[in-house]
Image (cartoon, rainbow, N blue to C red):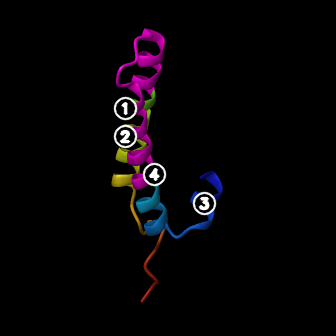
Amino acid sequence: MVFLSLVLRPRVNKIINIVVALVYAVSIIASCIGEGWIYYLLGSAVEVVLLAAIVRTAWVWPTVPAIVGRREPFA
């Protein structure tokens, strides 16, 4: 995923990061159903929180890079 984040266009990267994180979070939650070991549930909860942070970061990340230090030409 790191490689794809570097080579894909920002809009495509944003969409893929959101979709993959959501699908992975749903699979983690589904695997916790019926689980009795507390360390497994705690680890899964931490992982889902981190995936939610990834989704939020990808959601608010700008798709067009800002131009830093742009100056107007002298007239």
Disc 4 residue type (three-letter): Val
**Residue 3 found in image quarter:** bottom right
Q: Is residue 37 magenta?
A: yes
* Segment colored magenta: 18-46
Image spot of residue 12 (x, y percent): 46, 68
> Is label 3 or label 1 in front?
1
Which residue matches tag 3? Answer: 4
Cα–Cα gap, marks 2 and 4: 10 Å
Decide: marks 1, 2 in contact (CB < 8 A)? yes
> Is label 3 or label 4 in front?
4
Disc 3 residue type (three-letter): Leu
Image spot of residue 58 (x, y percent): 40, 52
Lower sequence index among marks 3 and 2:
3
Which residue matches tag 2? Answer: 26
Which residue matches tag 4? Answer: 20
Image spot of residue 25 (x, y percent): 40, 39
